[in-house]
Amino acid sequence: MAETAYSEDGPRRPVPAGKVLPARGRGPTVMMGYWDRDLHNAVADTALATWFGFTVDAIKGTHLSAVIGETAYQDSLPQVAGVLAGAEQHWTRQMLNSSGETRTAQVALIPHTRDGEVRGFISLFTDLTETLAGESQAKDSLERYRALARSIPSVFVLLYDADLRHVVAEGQALTAFGFREHHIEGRTLFESLPHHRAVELEPRYRSALAGTEVTWTREVGDRVFSLKTGPVETDGVVSAGMVVAMDITKARQREQSWAALHEISTAVARSEDTASVTAKVSEVLRRLFLVDNASVIRFAPSGSVQIVAVSPNDRDIADDVQSHQSGSGLATDIIWHTGNAAIAHYDARSEGGAGVMFGNGFRASAAAPIHVLGDLWGAVVLSSRTKERVSEEVLGRLSEFANLVEIAIGNTQARAELEQQAKTDTLTGLPNRRTFQARLDLELSSAAATGQPLSLVVFDVDHFKSVNDTHGHSTGDLVLAEIARRLRRAARHGEMLARLGGEEFVWLLPGVAAEQAQAAAERAGLSVASERFAASWVVTVSSGVCDLASAGAANLLDCADIALFEAKRQGRNRSVAYRAPSPE
């Protein structure tokens, strides 16, 4: 039995019954169904039917409410009404599967229109429960692909998964092939293209998924396109394939731009940090523009520049330029003062940074600004030993490329900031409990392997409730932040001070035994108590100390807590070391 693939023009071609829609790499499975205007199922793949407890045959003709359940059906009526009115619907909700499990599903409803009338709609269900965080990252990556594709004229990008389903179809040049994005996106190669073209492309798609790049050209009317498909890797594993097509009729020099797009997009998709992404950018720039040197610089608030990436990696020249920035005469200096892309030429009269460039054989540079979140972040710079390589046309192309870099750097920086926030206690700026636990696990493994001592100190602010009750919670927060500052001064390089929560702090001391750790804890306690708060009142801390030798098989943190309790019992404002109970 065959299922029918629907397009804007109606059924196009049969696909094998029971075909399971793909999962991107190791991501969740996407499940598809087609529903008529009366909300009865016309087509469903095996994954969708099984998820809701049906067979492929049994689900056909079944009303939507009977498939997803009455509660979910009632909740979804506004979206159903929207798609029947011709508007795509996207949302995420909790749903029960056939096993009675509550799952998080991402739902998309796509109208099927013919002769101006909505005849039904396609539903796409994605179970995100186990990989919600990864799917969120994937969604961000897809948006980056879209933004990158939109930013380059005469280009389109197709991103497809392991089952050859197009996850992203974006770019102005799609229309030259007679397609719009909605003809292709969400559909497999054979569902979206004529059969003979899909047969031609299938081996190329599969080669990309196997890790091999394939290139070819195609004439469309009077236009010539260069196309390339290649693997997209995540964590060293091929998770998808990507086709990049470019109009090379009038601009053969743009032939390599898709390679730059692919490389930078892959770096973003791999969630690489800013340093890795900018290094990739400088490498791609030099190759793409055929110049002698390419770099990515970042502006400090004063206007001075930091060369964060350079290709080739000649740090001597980079450091020399950075140390001669006053009246530099560099193209980046023009950007700092005007915000505009610029060209600078160097000769024997050049001074400052421009003189350094001339002395190293460079005769011209072009630079284009990079903005992140609306602010001037830095610039991409091309430098050449001949003036002819740096022209207004090159500057224009570089400015276009800088727009792509903005997206890559902006996203990697935003991700890095979120990751840092997830590791840090916002009140004190110290590592939070989650970060501390990860470090403790590492140090425990290291101590077990090397036999080195490991100590832990738990601090608790004495009578902190009275601080909050007397002076208010805002003052209490200020006290905690100040105590964190004073304790931090006691911690040495390689040690970790973190906030456990409330008024508790923890200090991890690798390579330190209990006796030395207790002495350090007592010094830290004196540091807290020796300076008055608000010039009038004193705050003290109690601490419990434990090392691996004393804890034995017990939990190190639990033993330090026991010692802390004893310090409190003895009158507070003191440090007590844990002593294991004597065996009876």
Image: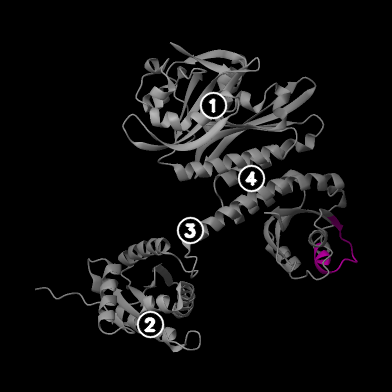
Q: In the picture shown, does residue 557 fall above or below 523?
A: above
> Nearer the viewer's eye, disc 4 or disc 3?
3
Structural distance between the alpha carbons of marks 1 and 3 = 39 Å
Q: Is residue 212 visible?
A: no
> Nearer the viewer's eye, disc 4 or disc 1?
1
List the single residue furthest toward the right.
Answer: 349
Query: Which disc number belongs to residue 264?
Result: 4
Q: Which residue is mark 3?
A: 422
Q: Earlier in the sequence, mark 4 or mark 2?
A: 4
Residue at disc 3, secondary structure: helix
Residue type, label 3: Ala
| Circles 4 and 3 in contact, beta carbons < 8 Å | no
What is the crowding at mark 2: few (fewer than 14 residues within 10 Å), some, or many (at least 20)?
Answer: some
Measured as percent of width and height from the top left, residue 120 is found at: 54, 19
Q: Which residues are magenta?
A: 343-357
What is the crowding at mark 3: few (fewer than 14 residues within 10 Å), some, or many (at least 20)?
Answer: some
Query: Residue 172 is drawn in which quadrant?
Result: top right
Residue type, label 1: Ala
Query: Which disc number belongs to residue 520?
Result: 2
> Nearer the viewer's eye, disc 1 or disc 3?
1
Measured as percent of width and height from the top left, residue 162 is found at: 50, 30
Residue at disc 4, secondary structure: helix
Residue type, label 2: Ala
Structural distance between the alpha carbons of marks 2 and 1 = 68 Å
Q: Which residue is mark 1?
A: 81
Q: Earlier in the sequence, mark 4 or mark 3?
A: 4
